[in-house]
Amino acid sequence: MTVRDLFGNVPARRKFLRQPATEATYINRMIGAYACHRSDIQWSLTNDGRPAIKTNGRGDDAGAAVGVFGSELAGNALLLGEMSDDMRVPGVTVTGWISAPDVSRSHRQSQHFFVNGRLISHRALTYALEDTYHSLLMVGRHPICMVRIEVDPAAVDVNVHPTKAEVKFADERAVARAVQRAAHAALLGQQNDVLPEISFQPIPRATLDHNQITFSSGADPIPLDDHQVLDSRSRGEQANEVSSPTSPNPSGIPVLRVLGQVGATYIIAEGPQGMFLIDQHAAHERIMYEKILSQMQANAVDQQPMLDPLVIELPPDELAIFEKSVDELNQIGFATERFGDTTIILRAVPALVRGVDLSVRIHDILRELVDGGAGDSWMDSVAISASCHTSIRAGQALSLPEMRELVAQLERCQHPRACGHGRPTMLHMSQHELERQFNRR
């Protein structure tokens, strides 16, 4: 049997690649997709004499993922299907795996969806999966996955595309919901929720020079706590919160003792497992973002009227994006309206916003939105941009009480480890690494 016999006409099936590719690249990706799907079959592929794919055929989905995508998925392929009965969607069975947030790609070429054994492309399923990673991945990064979906053949139409590359479900929302719940359960059950760990470059004792010591974040991450569980809930979906026995915080972040500030940008804190460096801007952005969402969901946005309304002149591109975003800005607490041909007037701001140059920050918010925004919806993009550009900035000196309050609020966040743009809020250096660097181990 040839590759063409197995997968059909190569040019017609290139829809899965979403970009120009050589036939060898296409074959690699198609073989990889089916090798993940049929982990009960042993697959082997060589490319120019080099092994590209090799699986053992033992029916181990996680093992097949490693055989296709390499060792970076060892321990990072989260199996789908384990969830409580009340979370299952009747008539839809979802199995397979998704990657942990530590492993991602800049494209979606490594996402494979199978419906009743057929490899398909489906935008709604892709969106449902990626929505569960909200704020867990940097903007522009995408998870890897192999998702099997089993439904009643009568509930899916496979004849909506000439090459059978797309299908139509009788109940698309139910299938998307099943995928999202399965992915959510896998992320929630991940026992390896970690912060990026700081490590030093090893330096021989005889040549030790303090000028040679540098920070990096390339070391293998260390778990905060063995009992800690990731709460990666999508917005609007409820789930049980699990905290570590050593932490009263639902997020699992341990209680931290603030020690000081570095470069008016990073807060140094001590925790049960060592030292933590907190990016004050990213941390405050996360706090502001969750407060904005919370107030919107409760229909209780706290707004502060301005004694003297502020008139702001906007360039054409910012004025155009303002027209698109005025309703969303008003929903999160900015009372704004057009005022003349090239200006707007600001009459009130969210009560959360204090001590900032409003004219400059409004320009910053609109400029980010001109560039496309960072959210999964336009409302989300506006909320992320507003929380970012009204937050404490890098280079701003804070008093010790201000740092303590900032860290305390971060500990109470639902998703404290990343800002709305997906940047980490903190790094961790373990006690073990500290002792090793000071030659105590």
Image (cartoon, grey):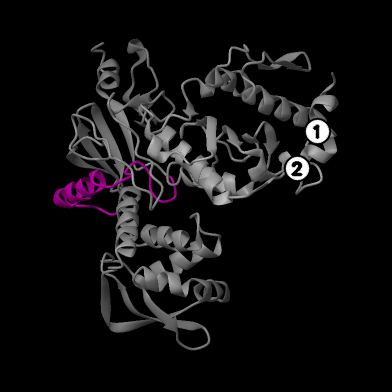
Q: Position of residue 131 (x, y in %)?
A: 49, 47
| Position of 230 relative to 420 (above/below) | above
Q: Helix, strand or loop at disc 2? A: helix
**Between 197 and 172, the one nearer to me in the picture:** 172
Q: Nearer the viewer, mark 1 or mark 2?
A: 2
Q: Helix, strand or loop at disc 1? A: loop
Q: Position of residue 18 (x, y in %)?
A: 72, 43
Q: Is residue 6 left or right of residue 349?
A: right
Magenta-colored stretch includes residue 66: no
Q: Is residue 20 visible?
A: no
Which label number is shown at residue 22? 1
Quarter where residue 148 is shown? top right
Quarter where residue 49 is shown? top right
Q: Say which quadrant the N terminus sits in.
A: top right
Q: Amino acid at mark 1?
A: Thr
- What segment carries the magenta color? 396-422
Residue in the image at 82% along x and 24% along y: 3
Q: Is residue 3 left or right of residue 387?
A: right
Disc on the earlier residue, 1 or 2: 2
Q: Position of residue 288 (x, y in %)?
A: 31, 57
Q: Position of residue 354 (x, y in %)?
A: 26, 66
Q: Is residue 431 visible?
A: yes
| Position of 333 relative to 111 (above/below) | below
| Residue at the extreme left | 401
| Position of 298 relative to 228 (above/below) | below
| Position of 202 relative to 218 (above/below) | above
Marks 1/2 in contact by CB < 8 Å: the verdict is no
Residue underneath mark 2? 15
Q: Amino acid at mark 2?
A: Lys
